[in-house]
Amino acid sequence: MGIKEKGLIKELKENGFSYSNVDKIYIKQALEPVEVEIVLKWLPELYKEHLGTGDQAVRSLMSAKRVFDPSLLIDLFENSDLNETIKAGIGLTLSYANTTDISEWMKDQLLDKELRMERYALIDGLLKKGKFSSVKEYMNFLKKIFDRYGGEDILKLFKKYGDKDDMLFLAEKAKKAEPKFAKAINKVIEKKKV
């Protein structure tokens, strides 16, 4: 266990929360607001000390009981020199954690920012956190980002939520797609016909 991780564990203990390491925080499944604040405070230092420890700590925030301000996570996601895999973990946390409203930020990341691997992680949380008025509005957004982020993950969402019009959209995309991806698209279309 590194020095920073020991510091986090010590501060949590001083506030009434006993853990042997960061992994135990992750598996708790219901972090109190004070725990969230402490994890956020230590997070940048944890990443500097050990990427895996930082990644486990950030993912623990997905179980926050109360809404919290994700500004630090957004800053790490957008501005840090962390690698794309680690940033994808931050993206998943932003997608699933009980944060203040980040709907416009998420949409902006996917629509207007450069294509980056870590941004795929935001797609998972879009339906829940995107503040769409309907599934149709959500599907229309997915169509807007399809050419940039189209892949197996988005196809799963089309399969789950898509209607007849969405399948027509996919049929057009299949005509222009690489053979392997066209085959995957056509599988989704066939399954929706059943």
Image (spheres, rainbow, N blue to C red):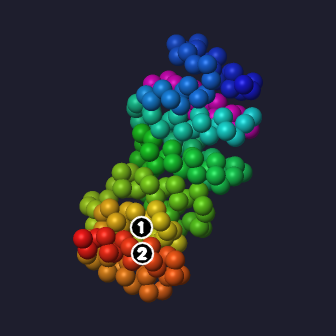
Q: Looking at the image, which residue is at 49% across and 55% down?
A: 122
- Residue on which disc 2 sits: 185
Q: Looking at the image, which residue is at 64% across and 52% down?
A: 85
Q: Looking at the image, which residue is at 62% across and 23% down?
A: 21
Q: In this view, does 160 lie to the left or right of 77?
A: left
Looking at this view, is 19 or 47 the one in front? 19
Residue 137 visible from this viewpoint: no
Q: Which mark is residue 155?
A: 1
Q: In this view, does 33 lie to the left or right of 89?
A: left
Residue type, label 1: Leu
Q: Looking at the image, which residue is at 68% across and 26% down?
A: 5
Which quadrant would the N terminus be assigned to in this image?
top right
Looking at this view, is 94 or 152 the one in front? 152
In magenta, the rendered stretch is 31-48
Which quadrant would the C terminus be assigned to in this image?
bottom left
Question: Up-down: is 173 above or below 27?
Answer: below
First-in-chain label (2 vs 1): 1
Q: Label 1: how many residues lie within 10 Å, few (<14), some (14-19) or many (20+)? A: many
Task: Report x, y in % for residue 179.
Answer: 51, 82
Q: Residue 13 lies in magenta, yes or no?
A: no
Question: Up-down: is 15 above or below 115?
Answer: above
SS at badge 2: helix
Task: Report x, y in % for residue 158.
Answer: 36, 67
